[in-house]
Image (cartoon, rainbow, N blue to C red):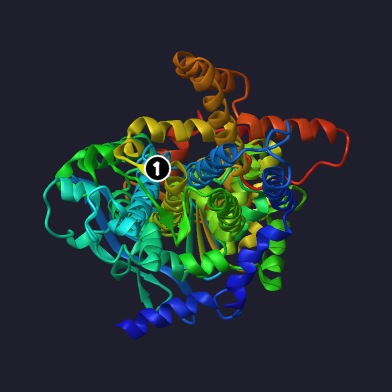
Amino acid sequence: MLASRSWLSRPFRERSTQIFLGVLLAALAVVTLLNLIVPAGHPLHVSTYTVTLLGKYLSFALLAVALDLVWGYLGILSLGHGAFFALGGYAMGMYLMRQIGDRGVYGDPVLPDFMVFLDWDSLPWYWHGFDMAWFAFLMVLLAPGLLALVFGFLAFRSRVTGVYLSIITQALTFALMLAFFRNEMGFGGNNGLTDFKELLGFDLRSDATRLGLFLASGVALALGYVLCRAIVASKLGRVSVACRDAEARTRFIGYRVERVQLFVFVVSAMLAGVAGALYVPQVGIINPGEFSPIFSIEVVLWVALGGRGTLYGAVIGALVVNYAKTVFTGVMPEAWLFALGGLFVVVTVLLPKGVAGLLASLRRRRDDGAVETPAQGASS
Amino acid sequence: MNLLKEMASRDRVFDFMAPARSPVDVRHGPILYLEDVSVSFDGFRAINDLNLTIDDGELRCIIGPNGAGKTTMMDIITGKTRPDHGSVWFGSRHDLLTMSEPQIASLGIGRKFQKPTVFEALTVFENLELAMAADKRIWPTLTARLSGEARDRIDEVLVTIGLTAHRDRPAGILSHGQKQWLEIGMLLMQRPRLLLVDEPVAGMTEQEMERTAELLTGLAGKQSVVVVEHDMGFVRSIARTVTVLHQGSVLAEGSMDQVSSDPKVVEVYLGTESDNTEDARC
């Protein structure tokens, strides 16, 4: 156990992680203070609406970090990470549905509204257990984890990589979207799950709960970041980079490449699931739209914009793009997709390594003339 | 069977600490022993009743015209190709024909391919670290910490391959020759008993060739080295014993001078190919 503690504690000794955690925690504290202390109406006041919006961004940032772990360090471009995000979200949504109890429109003590509407007389077997928080939270990890395990096992064992794997992940999320659209699946079909009341006994509409969810998203992002950093900075992280760059060679020196890929892929899927579980109570709804291929591709854009293979770049990308999206869709909604496309073109042409690459080259320019900095692992 | 597997894996865990490494029995002289080996592909006899013996600690060069069966011979030794008949022994205890590729590799036979492949994004040090003999399953790899001995071992190999100054540079910026040395270093990290080196100096500059010659002659003695090479000048500079392959079997064997004055050899190899090999250096 001592050894395992030490690989997890390694990121805390890294300067980049210290800076990241410092900035993130400071931002959380500032937003909390501006929300609680500064009176409403003051120009510096952060409204609860904004807090929830920021909480949503933070859960997206966690999803982006999860994607960067597999794309940036393992070379697996998943175009279906939204599927794991949505599965985590559905697990949370099912728990929240069961928490409604008899306060639904139809007042059934057990069945969620959409099942009463569909004339179902009992709960499908897979809805059992979701009235218990511990079970639901476990499922937030297990449902995406299991899907990733089965899918990854089959794909990596057959040595499917590169573009083909990307296409299959895209097909996976598309197939799940079609399945979840069906009413017979028992997940609310087209409308998804909504009308949530409370989470662990806290009223979801109260300001305090919303602030709590925002903070929880921030803490989850911090923990997820540290976990990914720990994996990346370990020998396994270097083996991942080796798999990314020269798979056959890695196999030749004795590593089981498909197991490395499977392990990292499953960890990433679970992180995506946690992100989805934090997203759902903040937006108040989960529907099959989260499975849509477009969403998964958007996640890839966040990571590409931020700079892949750095982890913090993924966070920057997710926050910047989603902030821009909020602003644009408010001011001129029809222009958003053009703006996103334009942003992507600009970054690919001018900043091939994303925002993180820009930051790194600025830092190098500042250090110019100083002693040659030791190369930092995977910098591509 | 389970016990055997367990023992095998445990043996590898402590591999880099224990001075006595692979349990290869070389008391009877040769470390590698090929007898009457034949293999044919679609009727073409790539290897034809080949007999070859490599002594422990020996540096052997193998030459021969294209299609003489040099690469096929390497494939048979490493388990990639199975011969139609014949026997291949590693020491006097291990029948290589009953073993799989990874088993043969873990027994201590390392092979360097023609084209150098190193992990370009990782530093030279990290390349060697990954190649080190260790428990390579997921959890041990995740929690692995570099021990003092391992660090010393890596530094030792860095000195051997002459890349100490490039320790913390990404392998991607190394020159072609340096990448070849790094790859030899990665083989050395696995503490092989026998190194199979395929055309090490292809595409190298004059100085790089000299460095490679030094490196390979320095390695012999501690481990056996088999070099397959086209460049006659290079072979002359390192070889003590040269084996000439022709049409899948041994045509001649002996010192470079003996071999190059052998009329059969001159006819099939030196005579016909001396025009396009750089004989100026011989």
Say which chain tag 1 marks: A
Q: Is residue B55 visible?
A: no
* Image: A125 above or below A215: below
Residue A127 location in percent, x, y?
24, 60
Q: Is residue A144 left or right of residue B232?
A: left
Residue A300, image x and y in percent? Answer: 46, 34
Residue B67, placed above or below residue B52:
above
Residue at mark 1 = A81
Quadrant of the image containing the N terminus of chain A = bottom right
Disc 1, SS: helix
- Picture quarter containing residue B205? top right
Front position in the image: A24 or B147: A24
Residue A301 x/y as whole percent:
49, 30
The x, y position of residue B169, in whole percent, is: 71, 45
For the point 73% across and 59% down, the residue is A13
Q: Nearer the viewer, residue A69 or A197?
A: A197
Q: Amino acid at mark 1?
A: His
Residue at horizontal 50 percent and vertical 29 percent from the top: B276
Image quadrant in which you'd find residue A256? bottom left
- Residue in the picture at 22% in, 41% down: A189
The local crowd at label 1, few if under 14, some if 14 to 19, many if 20 or more residues have their Cα within 10 Å, is: many
From this viewpoint, which residue is outermost toward the right?
A369
Please state the total of marks drawn on the protein image.
1
Identify the image quadrant of residue A379. Answer: top right
